[in-house]
Amino acid sequence: MSDALRYWEPRRIVYNALLALVVMVYFVINWPHSGRAVSLEGILWVFILAVLANVCYCAAYLGDLFVQVSGFRAAWQKWRWVLFLVGGAFAAIITRWFAIGFFSPSGNG
């Protein structure tokens, strides 16, 4: 378990920074409409989505722990960065869809 924590927790910062960057890019691209779209309720929705994104990030622990107790532990430790990249890309795509919905004038990309 401590190996999983040591690996995944520092990368959570990169994961959150990536998702924040996606949101900021779409906010800037859709300015000035995006500025008018910001409200207290919208900020609360973004907070809820950020929490849910971090809950989904924790799913990596399940796979990591499962493989670490198997005979594939050594190989997994060399290749688990692939899970981080695929999961980060998937999360960025989902974040992009939400950002388009929040900030673009038409609500579709």
Image (cartoon, grey):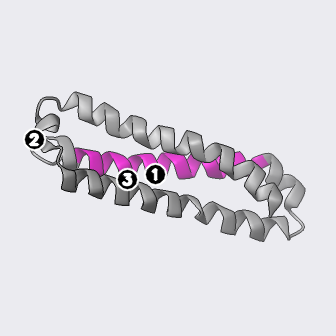
Q: Is residue 22 left or right of residue 73?
A: left
The amino acid marked with disc number 1 is Ala
Mark linked to residue 105 = 2
Mark-to-mark CA distance, 3 and 2: 19 Å
> For mark 3, what is the residue?
94
Q: Position of residue 39 (x, y in %)?
A: 17, 48
The amino acid marked with disc number 3 is Ile
Q: Is residue 96 left or right of residue 34?
A: right
Magenta stretch bounds: 79-100
Pick whichever of labels 2 and 1 is earlier in the sequence.
1
Q: Secondary structure at mark 3?
A: helix
Q: Is residue 1 left or right of residue 33?
A: right
Q: Is residue 103 above or below residue 59?
A: above
Which image quarter: residue 48? bottom left
In the picture, the quarter occupied by the C terminus is top left
Identify the residue at horizontal 28%, vertical 58% (top origin). Answer: 45
Mark linked to residue 72 = none
In the picture, the quarter occupied by the N terminus is bottom right
Mark-to-mark CA distance, 1 and 3: 5 Å
Q: Residues within 10 Å of mark 1 (few under 14, many from 20)?
A: some
The amino acid marked with disc number 2 is Pro
Which image quarter: residue 21? top left
* Badge 1 vs badge 3, beta-carbon distance below 8 Å: yes
Q: Is residue 92 left or right of residue 34?
A: right
